[in-house]
Amino acid sequence: MGLNTRLFNQHVILETNNSTERIFPEVPEVDDPAYWRRMDALIAHSDRLRAIDANEAMPEALKTAAKVPVYGAMAVGIVQLFLGPVKRTGSYDHAADPKALVY
């Protein structure tokens, strides 16, 4: 199909973030280049896990051992994303205003 999955995934994340800005008081700061570097690193770790699984010459016990540091790096990356910069939208402030509610 010729689809660039990285660009498509970025588009989906950006659009989702734009939508959630209307609902939540804070959203991830996806305009921060560090956000995308961390996402790319998670994809690279995932690729590494697939490569380990695909290695038929490696015994299962060794595969498991090889995956441990990759899972650790992924956990660190996820925490970094979670604790990364946020964009304050103020949506919660508007939702707390009874006059702003529409029935």
Image: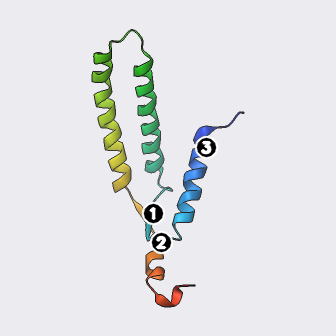
Q: Position of residue 8 (x, y in %)?
A: 62, 45
Q: Quadrant of the C terminus?
A: bottom right
Residue 79 percent coordinates (x, y): 32, 49
Q: Quadrant of residue 67?
A: top left
Give the residue at mark 2.
89
Which residue was labeled with disc 1?
27
Which residue in the protein does label 3 denote? 7
**Disc 3 versus disc 1: distance between alpha carbons?**
20 Å
Question: Dots 2 and 1: beta carbons under 8 Å?
Answer: yes
Q: Please identify the quarter of the rendering in which residue 55 is found.
A: top left
Q: Secondary structure at mark 3?
A: helix
Alpha-carbon span between mark 2 and mark 1 = 7 Å
Is 62 placed above or below 38 here?
A: above
Q: Residues within 10 Å of mark 3 (few under 14, many from 20)?
A: few
| N-term mark: 3 or 2 | 3
Q: Amino acid at mark 3?
A: Leu
The reply to whether discs 3 and 1 touch (Cβ–Cβ < 8 Å) is no
User: What amino acid is at disc 1?
Assistant: Val
Name of the residue lying farthest toward the bottom:
99
Q: How crowded is the residue under tag 2: few (<14 C-alpha within 10 Å), some, or many (20+)?
A: some
